[in-house]
Amino acid sequence: MNDQKSETTSPYRIRVEAPEVWQRIIKVEVSRAHFDQQYAKRLHHAAKAHVRPGFRKGKTPKKLVEKEIGDRLRAETLERIVPETFKAAIVEHELIPITDPQLENLVYEPEKPLAYDLVIEVRPKITAQDYNDLPLSQRKAEIKDSDVDDVLARLQESRAIHEKVERPAQDGDQIVADLVPLGVDGRPDPARAVPEQRMELGAETNFQAFNEAFSGVQAGEVKQVEITYPDDHYREELRGRSVAFQCTIKEVQEKRVPELDDSFASSLQEGQTLLELRQSIRKDLLLEEQKRVDRELEEQIVDALIERNDIAVPPSLVEQYLKSGLEELKGRNSQMGRPTSAEDEEQYRQVTRPVAERILKGMFIMESIRRQENIEVSEPEIEERIGEVAREHNLDEERYRQYAREGAERDRIMHALEERKTFDFLLSRANIQKAEAAAE
């Protein structure tokens, strides 16, 4: 695709090619007269400030000045002209670049126009096609009694207490022990001691050597345990190493889970019965399940739109997505004391790149549908949603409204509403088939 717009009175001849929907090649010709004029101005100013032995300041002949610094002045002239032509191209051809221009194919020959290409990426302008009658499968949001039971069991576990017992340790007990590593001479090293380490006997997260050694122990016993750290341990200095510990058992504690009755329910909310607690849990679970069902429909919509609209996305935006995700990955690894290797980064890029491309494709197609269907969000709708967010999160409404007006929060809310309206529009025109509830 070529755009042949040009301005006869301009010293520049500019045309734009679009080899990709996201790429523009700005082909520039600068008249020789204009380049020579700009170069002459720089040479004149440089000569006035030039200092050379045998000449007073500013009196060096221009030919000598040009011989000494002419190449640098030509480069500076080019550096001045390139941004001017780039700005002219943006205005003339209504471009919206998302990357800085890359200078390519520079041609600089005596007595000929200066020529070069400026390569940029732009937000692709697409026209979404075939977005009516999307085939969707919607399952019913259902909650089973066992789902409620699982939540109640977790609530019981979260309020379990550990009480000291005078008996041999059993699986499920909590062991409190002082762990002291042994040095190379086989003697305890108090400087590296780990006091009052707690672990649940039999837990899969323990080193198996601890589970075996602590089975049946009682307070006051001393055990020597040798463990071998895995080759992928987060602490590099321990990978593959075997370390022996002197373990002094301080306490054996039995875990006691509260009875599941009205008293337990009331401890969570005063006056609440167990039946009311179950009903409350079911209601919350159903709300979450309905949200999952809705998200599944949205994912189906995006997949169907991408299948029906084959578009390419700017590589720079994919790279920005990957870079942002990598920074988060490195931050998480750093908090756990685990370095992020080059192999980790490469694996992340390979796994995440298709995800990034899908997200960006969906975003561009949805934006196109909003534009084509004139889907907009009104000020009252934004203000109403701001109030809802404040109430949902128990925030002071006026203070939150002020915060939303001053920062990026309002734009985030507006974009979320636009997206919701677009999904609702597509759902209203979709071919939705009912499906069975999700299997376990």
Image (spheres, rainbow, N blue to C red):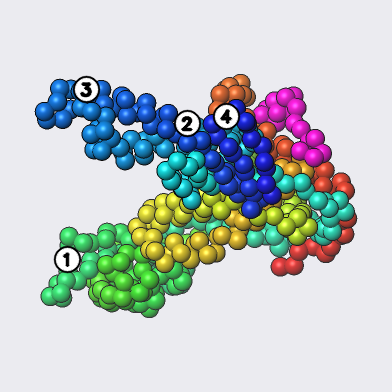
Label placed on residue 58: 3
Label placed on residue 34: 2
Q: Earlier in the sequence, mark 3 or mark 4?
A: 4
Left or right position of 29 against 169: right
Left or right position of 295 against 248: right
Label 2 secondary element: helix
Front-most of residues 39 and 253: 39
Q: Earlier in the sequence, mark 2 or mark 1?
A: 2
Label placed on residue 10: 4
Residue at x 63%, y 47% (from the top left corner): 17
- Spatial separation of the CA atoms under disc 2 and disc 3: 25 Å
Q: Earlier in the sequence, mark 4 or mark 1?
A: 4
Residue at x 75%, y 31% (from the top left corner): 377
Q: Quadrant of residue 26?
A: top right
- Spatial separation of the CA atoms under disc 2 and disc 1: 80 Å
Q: Residues within 10 Å of mark 2 (few under 14, many from 20)?
A: some
Label 3 secondary element: loop
Q: Earlier in the sequence, mark 2 or mark 3?
A: 2
Residue that numbered label 1 is attached to: 189
What's the residue type where badge 3 is placed?
Answer: Gly
Report the magenta stretch's main SS: helix
Label 1 secondary element: loop
Asked if marks 2 and 4 touch (Cβ < 8 Å), the reply is no
Front-most of residues 66 and 153: 66
Q: Residues within 10 Å of mark 4 (few under 14, many from 20)?
A: few
